[in-house]
Image (tube, rainbow, N blue to C red):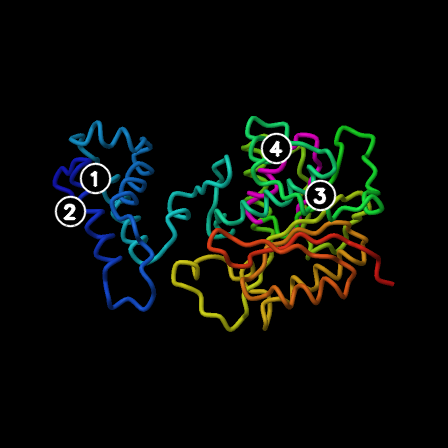
Amino acid sequence: MNQGFCVRDCLAQGTQILHKASSNTNMQYESFITRARLEAEILLAFVLKKSRVWLHTYNETKVRRREYELFLGLVCRRAKGYPIEYLTQKASFFESEFFVDSRVLIPRPESEILLYKVCEVLVSYGITPESKSSFFVADFLDSSVQGSLESGEKDFAHRDSAFSFEMIEVGVGSGALSISLARLFPKAHIIATDISKDALEVAAYNAKALGVAHQIQLVHTSLLDTLNASNALLVFSNPPYIANSYTLPKNVAFEPRIALFGGESGSEILSELIAQCAAKNIAHLVCEMGYDQRQCMQNTLESYGYRALFYQDLAGLDRGFVAHLCHKIK
């Protein structure tokens, strides 16, 4: 029971609980709490609706019993592996902060590489970001992407409308990718699909909160089903690609399974997406994939007429591909 704890006391107790959880050798999963003090600060700042700087400045301030109990409850849930992003209902991705809860996957930093790869394709068409952060394009632009776009492949005609080009995201989730791209490219129209109505609700909230709802059309469907993709310059996706038999780490197990598992081998959904893109004559496909799926994906892409360039994540593992349609499969 709280006997008049102050901010400093709450942080000390929260840190102790989280540190004990992270160092408990009896746990059946790898340590998921690497920064006990930091996470205690994040949770207390969330409960008190204050900044972490405020916590340090006013660390003798008394905490109300209700706030103390809420904080302790969050700390205990975190100690059991529940993601801190779900507890605070926010996650950072690229330049923005997104609302997230257990209805959607937590955006990962490595998925920012997929965003850069989409930008590379757009820049190869002369479409550049209209954002103060556009400097990053020059740093990440891969000349091999431009070189792979032969003049015969650049048959995309810009639409005569308020939007100069159209893209499709399959599996929008929280909306992190589509919203980030919409903010970088204000003239883009993005059709974002998801099989989960819950995920679409979260994406709609984030798109409105971040001021790009007018650029993003959310569609409840599986992959590209029901879509007219004739105006789409490219499709991008971070689809489910984990094999059904894989045992998830404890912290990842709290995330929606429908957004994680891609079939018996894990590549089934990706393979179906490639087939649908080829059938709809999608010129460019940018996808994330599993680290061990390169050969499988290369074979599938080639069989449907795509030439693929694979990219690695920051750990040097195969993480995705940028594919260009060379010829339409009859």
Query: x%, y% of residue 5?
Result: 15, 38
Q: Amino acid at mark 2?
A: Met
Mark 1 to mark 2: distance in Å? 8 Å
- Residue that label 4 marks: 184
Magenta range is: 173-194
> Looking at the picture, does residue 141 appear above or below residue 60?
below
Question: Residue at left 75%, top 36%?
Answer: 165
Which residue is the site of mark 1?
Answer: 65
Identified at 66% across, 49% down, the residue is: 236
Q: Residue shown at 64%/31% (left/top)?
A: 129
Give above or below for 207 relative to 239: above
Q: Amino acid at mark 1?
A: Arg
Q: Residues within 10 Å of mark 2 (few under 14, many from 20)?
A: few
From the viewer's perspective, is the residue at label 3 or at label 2 nearer?
3
Quadrant of the image for the C terminus?
bottom right
Residue named by callout 2: 1
From the viewer's perspective, is the residue at label 3 or at label 4 nearer?
3
Q: Find out whether residue 247 is within the magenta segment.
A: no
Q: Secondary structure at mark 4?
A: helix
Q: Is residue 192 magenta?
A: yes
Classify 10 Å Cα crowding around label 1: few (below 14), some (14-19), many (20 and above).
Answer: some
Q: Which of pointers 3 and 2 lies earlier in the amino acid sequence? A: 2
| Precedes in sequence: disc 1 or disc 2 | 2
Marks 1/2 in contact by CB < 8 Å: the verdict is yes
Distance, label 1 to label 4, CA atoms, is 44 Å
First-in-chain label (4 vs 2):
2
- Residue at screen point 32% across, 31% down: 51
